[in-house]
Structure formats: structure tokens, C-alpha cells
Image (cartoon, grey):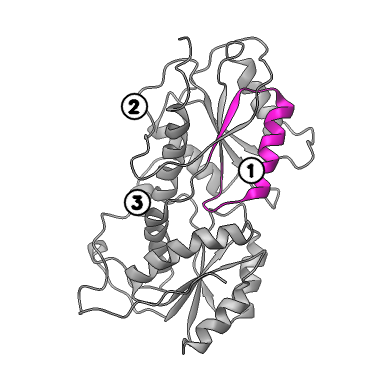
């Protein structure tokens, strides 16, 4: 059972550590659009071994300001539970990344369970990226669209990379708890379930005195989210617990623990980007414990920052194409 965290309120006006202007406001001002792709034709590629690039710390390399021709594509790989996994948040994230990085060859793909012949499946997308680059050159950086560990998705990606023959690497965006805590805070505030940051220049009446972070991906995801829960508890001065939609501890078990602490109004905060979790499962979990629910993280600015950092981290491990 992961640890539970409860932070007592501090002096009035000092309950939230200061933070910058929320990225959600900046995202709302962005105009949709796409930029040109930097692609270079090539020939067939050699068979590589899928290699996972471990996430770095707070000083990881960001997305380079300039990307030369032949730079590996960024593939947003969605472990989707529905047919609309490449729309909604995934499409919004891709749009922002293309606007910010017009030279980036960015693709979206479903993690195709069992290798279906789907052109939007990860194997087909990887094969196409490899065909547009010189033989043997790194062709893609695959970033799973998850913010907590998801062993099943990573395992399927390794298998897909091996089957496609692409010289691709996997980058991951978790172990970045401070950015996730801030994004979850914003989503809760947007739903009226937590006080907003003072710098957002407005205040609201909250309707929750305890928070459950809902994860997917198994027990490892809950363990990682427990650190995020601690940081979110410090921001909100409320008890915050992590639980799972597909493993132990369950949402109901976390709710029972909060009830034992005297918490009567619980809010559910999905610690997911969106398409990797079943919306019906989130709704059913909230209904089962009588909780109100915030929106998933979606295309929050911090999520986009984490994806950029994951891509830059992998590039720092690769030789520059053509050298």
C-alpha cells in the first residue's frame, strides 16, 4: 500500500508555493496549425535492438532549437483503449509541438496490439520513418503517451520496434513529479475542486477536502504517482492519495482510507493524459465513491514540456545523423 500524505494548512495567503503563469492559459491562445516536416529519403534499414532511454533528472536536455535534416522523427505512441486515441488530446499535443518545432518530423501512432495491418499502427509508422532516412541511421524516438510507468505499453513498443526493423529508441516522460503536481493542481482548480494559484488572479470555493490520483499501468504507476501525491498535498494543504484504475490499491480502497481520516468530500484527479485510460472506467470509479472528478491532463503545457524533454534526452544519447 503506497504511503498517504496529509499537509496541515499554513498561514492564510501562504498555503500555495508560488508558481508561474499556468501553461493552460498560454495553450488557449495558440492557433492550430502544422509546420513542414524535415524528412530525407533513404533506403531500407538494419535490424536494431529496441533500447529504452532512462528518464533523466531535472537538468535533462530540452528539445533542440534547430533540427538538421535526418533528425529522428518524434512518434507519439498511444496505448489507446478506444478507437479515437489519435484525436482529442493526442492531436492537440501534436499541433502544439509542430507549431513550436516546425522542423520536427512528428507522427502519432497507436500501439497496435498483435500487429494489425493499420497504417496508423506503430509498426507501419516506424517503417515509414525508417524508409525516409539513410540506412542504419536512427529513424525515430518513440514517446509513449503516459505520465506514469506502463510496463505493458513499453513491452509492446519493444516488440513493435523489433518487428518493424526500425532503428528507433524509446523515451519516457515519468519521474517528473513537480510538473505533474502543478498540472494536476490546475485541472482540479479548473473543475472548482481546489483553490487556484494566487498568480492566476482569481479564487474559487472548493468542494473537496481530499484528493485521489487515479492512475493506469499497474502497481508501479501507483508507486510513482505517490510522490506526485505528496507534492500535490503540499500545494493544496489537503490529504492526497494515489490509487489505480487497473490494479491495487483500488480507488475504493483509497476512498475508504480517506474516509477513515475524516474526509467527507473526495475529488478524483486522473493522473493520465487521456487516451491511455478508459473514460467510462474513470467515471464509474468517481461514481462508486461519490466523488467529483477533474479532467485528465490532456494537452497541458507541462505534459508537452515533458514530451519535449523526453525527446531531447534520447537525442543526447544518439550520434548526430551524417557524422
Query: Of helix, strand and loop, which one carries label 1?
Result: helix
Residue receiving disc 1: 154
What residue sits right under mark 3 in the picture?
23
Please tell me whether mark 2 sits on a helix, a strand or a loop.
loop
Q: Position of residue 287 (x, y in %)?
A: 62, 77
Between 204 and 291, the residue placed more toward the observer is 291
Residue 258 or residue 269, whichever sits in front: 258
Pick whichever of labels 1 and 3 is earlier in the sequence. 3
Are the two marked residues, 2 and 3, in contact with CB atoms closer than 8 angstroms? no
Q: Is residue 169 magenta?
A: yes
Within 10 Å of disc 2 (Cα), the crowding (few <14, some 14-19, many 20+) is few
Say whether residue 208 is magenta.
no
> Which residue: 47% across, 74% down?
4
User: Quadrant location of residue 117?
Assistant: top right
Of pointers 2 and 3, the one earlier in the residue sequence: 3
Mark 1 and mark 2: Cα distance apart in space: 28 Å
The residue range painted magenta reads 144-171
- Report x, y in % for residue 139: 57, 21
Side of 290 relative to 66 (left or right): right
| Residue 320 showing in the rendered view | yes
The image's mark for residue 65 is 2
Amino acid at each position: 500500500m503506497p504511503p498517504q500524505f496529509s499537509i496541515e494548512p499554513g498561514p492564510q495567503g501562504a498555503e500555495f508555493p508560488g508558481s508561474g503563469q499556468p501553461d493552460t492559459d498560454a495553450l488557449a491562445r495558440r492557433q492550430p496549425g502544422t509546420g513542414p516536416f524535415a524528412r530525407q529519403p533513404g533506403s531500407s534499414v538494419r535490424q536494431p535492438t529496441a533500447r529504452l532511454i532512462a528518464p533523466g533528472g531535472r537538468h535533462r536536455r530540452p528539445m533542440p532549437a534547430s533540427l538538421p535534416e535526418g533528425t529522428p522523427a518524434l512518434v507519439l505512441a498511444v496505448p489507446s483503449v478506444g478507437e479515437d486515441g489519435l484525436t482529442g488530446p493526442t492531436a492537440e499535443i501534436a499541433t502544439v509541438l509542430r507549431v513550436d518545432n516546425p522542423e520536427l518530423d512528428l507522427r502519432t501512432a497507436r500501439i497496435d496490439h498483435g500487429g494489425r495491418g493499420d497504417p496508423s499502427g506503430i509498426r507501419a509508422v516506424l517503417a515509414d520513418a525508417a524508409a525516409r532516412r539513410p540506412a542504419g541511421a536512427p529513424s525515430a524516438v518513440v514517446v509513449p503517451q503516459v505520465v506514469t510507468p506502463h510496463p505493458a505499453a513499453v513491452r509492446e513498443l519493444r516488440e513493435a520496434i523489433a518487428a518493424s526493423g526500425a532503428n528507433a529508441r524509446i523515451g519516457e516522460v515519468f519521474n517528473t513529479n513537480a510538473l505533474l503536481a502543478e498540472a494536476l493542481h490546475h485541472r482540479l482548480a479548473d473543475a472548482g475542486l481546489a483553490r487556484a494559484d494566487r498568480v492566476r488572479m482569481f479564487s474559487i470555493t472548493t468542494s473537496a477536502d481530499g484528493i485521489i490520483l487515479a492512475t493506469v499501468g499497474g502497481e508501479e504507476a501507483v508507486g510513482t504517482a505517490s510522490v506526485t501525491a505528496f507534492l500535490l498535498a503540499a500545494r493544496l494543504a489537503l490529504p492526497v492519495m494515489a490509487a489505480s484504475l487497473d490494479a491495487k490499491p483500488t480507488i475504493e480502497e483509497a476512498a475508504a482510507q480517506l474516509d477513515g481520516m475524516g474526509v467527507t468530500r473526495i475529488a478524483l484527479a486522473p493522473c493520465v493524459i487521456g487516451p491511455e485510460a478508459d473514460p467510462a472506467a474513470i467515471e464509474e470509479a468517481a461514481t462508486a465513491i461519490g466523488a467529483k472528478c477533474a479532467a485528465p491532463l490532456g494537452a497541458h503545457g507541462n505534459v508537452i514540456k515533458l514530451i519535449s524533454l523526453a525527446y531531447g534526452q534520447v537525442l543526447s544519447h544518439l550520434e548526430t545523423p551524417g557524422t
